[in-house]
Image (spheres, rainbow, N blue to C red):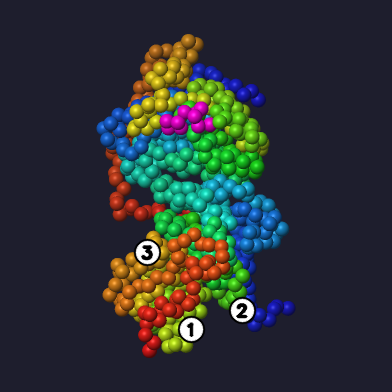
Amino acid sequence: MSAPRSNETKPVRMTYREACRQAIREALASDPRTFVMGEDVGLYGGCYAVTKGLLEEFGPNRIRDTPLSENAFVGAGIGAAIAGLRPIVEIMTCNFSLLALDQILNNAATIPHMSGGQFAVPLVFRMATGAGRQLAAQHSHSLEGWYAHIPGIKVLVPGTIEDARYMLKAALADPNPVLIFEHIVLYNAEGDLDPSVTDVDIRAAKIRRPGRDVSLLTYGNSLPKAIAAAETLSVEGIEAEVIDLRVLRPLDNATIFESIARTRRCVIVDEGWRSGSISAEIAARLADEAFFDLDAPIRRICSREVPIPYAGHMEEAALPQTAAIIETVRGLVRPR
Amino acid sequence: MSDKPHLDRDHALHLFRQMLRIRRFEAKCVELYQAQKIRGFLHLYDGEEAVAVGIMQMLEPRDAVVATYRDHGQAIARGVGMGPIMAEMFGKRQGTCRGRGGSMHIFDRATRFYGGNAIVGGGLPVAIGIAMADKELRPGAVTACFFGEGAAGEGAFHESMNLAELWRLPVLFVCENNLYAMGMPLEDAEAETDIYRKAKVYRMPGEMVDGMNPITVEAAARRAVDSIRAGNGPYFLECRTYRFRAHSMFDAQLYRTKEEVELWKQRDPLARAEAWLRENHMVSDEEMQRVAAEVDAEVEAAVAFAEAGTLEPVEELERFTLMDEVPQ
């Protein structure tokens, strides 16, 4: 007897963490070239418990625990990709990725071009990013904007359960190195997964909430903050459009420009530091190419320019918060 | 199986010819650098020929090579065509990397030559990964990873050595110890100057080899490759050698004496090989002249190939930054 059809279209509730795990499980089950490699991904179950249970299911060859050697295992992922495998390399946090920055920039991002197209580097780096759990300055930074500076790689930031579930598949199908930044605060977030969706487009930003008065451009854990701000503003008669950038490289100019052409106002919310950031890049592109669509100055809400501190009140003050988004939008848009 | 190479006349002459190909190629590079046909950094392999030539004798087409920025000799010995290498240095489209890499970054898919890497130690982790893939996809294949003794100062070196042994990967580590990391003398840089001993710490078999003699290098490579192919994991060869020329084209060589250079030149692997061939009456003057003439003709043909090459259109500048597909 077949299962009742209605079950298949019922939304499935799960956490962002579970969505990440299911994505990895699906990748391992569907492609024998795929394996996971990183610190404590196996026996420990993953620092953020994303890979919990996968060692038992897939064995130590495909869920490969590494020593604390970011430089070597990231480079090993690159070599394995060049030679025919499809590694998913987990780096515990993006702060630790700096120990492997040589490999990511000088090899992964460079070899396809530098070899004249003889070799591709098809692999995925997953890493945790962001602040909000009082982990202090060496576990809390947001470096996705930094990485978005580099030609030769793609930078994805899933801000929803759906993106956490399906971005990996698209990233693995891409012939280029793809970095996926998972926000540490989002791992526990719950949401409904629409069973009719099985793919996401990693070339495009996505409008998460339509609005007419201002465009809020954001990504990652600032996305729920922006949506919360938009809901509050809506009560006041201000309709904010929330755009989830989700692909920081290459940026989806079209979706951004199209939104600004309608709303004529822009606030960028970015957990990275303000100077030399992805928000700065977007503002520059708007100034270059959408200047005459704007009715007001571009506003940016970014992390304060400090190493993210431990104490809860200081950490909170260092990060973009909903109240600041509301206040900034109010200053930019008069209620209709 | 004996670990002695089968040293008949043909093989000895073959080794000599391979080394001569590198030596003459590099000499031509200097000439072309002075003529400003070649620009950028240029690191020459003179004096170290026996290392690449000796190692490559044991490699098969299925094997992989990870090279350094001093990579012409490694590439030529591996079988990458001189013409495409020279064209690469001319910045031509017909170069190995369509002019995007230059002297320090020769890549060649056909010979599984995974690049001159210009970050010291940066190639070792990549070699680990290639070996991981080969262990699954091409059982029996060996990855030969070249690096200088300067790499021993890098964390990537130690991390990679550990991973290679921990995971029993088919990697042949080839340390070209030419005694200077650019201008940094070995004894000023390393607390343990016998680099091969570092392999032992990772429980990896390792040995020191006379890198000025292709026969000893080949014999050591045979022991190493046999062991690796038998499934015993990685192997480490420290080849003691010396670079006769400056580090690059911008180097006043203040860190070493002319006397020291002259002393090492007395151990010139080409001169020794030639002397050995002659002393054993294996070649005549005519034969030696013929070999030299053939090598010179090959080098000249490479230059002609590079000269005749065309420039990559600048419209293609961004091509391959992101790939449309994985090359098969």
**Front tag of 3 and 1:** 1
How far across and down, in percent of the image, does residue A324 sit? 45, 75
Please give the residue where the numbered disc 3 appears in the rendered image: A281
Instruction: Please give the range of residues in magenta.
Output: B181-190
Badge 1: residue crowd in 10 Å (few <14, some 14–19, many ≥20): some
Badge 2 vs badge 1, beta-carbon distance below 8 Å: no
Q: Quadrant of residue B191?
A: top right
Q: Residue visible at 38% across and 19% down?
A: B258
- Dot label at residue B184: none
Mark 1 residue type: Thr
Mark 1 chain: A
Is residue A164 visible in this depiction of the protein? Answer: no
**Front tag of 2 and 1:** 1
Mark 3 chain: A
Left or right of B298 in this view: B202: right
Q: Residue visible at 61% across and 55% down?
A: A36
Badge 2: residue crowd in 10 Å (few <14, some 14–19, many ≥20): few
Please give the residue where the numbered disc 1 appears in the rendered image: A232
Earlier sequence position, callout 3 versus callout 1: 1
Tag 1's secondary structure?
helix
How far across and down, in percent of the image, does residue A156 sit? 49, 63
Question: Residue B60 versus residue A176: which sits nearer the camera?
Answer: A176
Give the CA distance from mark 2 to mark 3: 37 Å
Left or right of A36 in this view: A253: left
Which quadrant would the N terminus of chain B be assigned to in this image?
top right
Badge 3: residue crowd in 10 Å (few <14, some 14–19, many ≥20): some
Mark 2 residue type: Pro
Mark 3 residue type: Glu
Please give the residue where the numbered disc 2 appears in the rendered image: A11
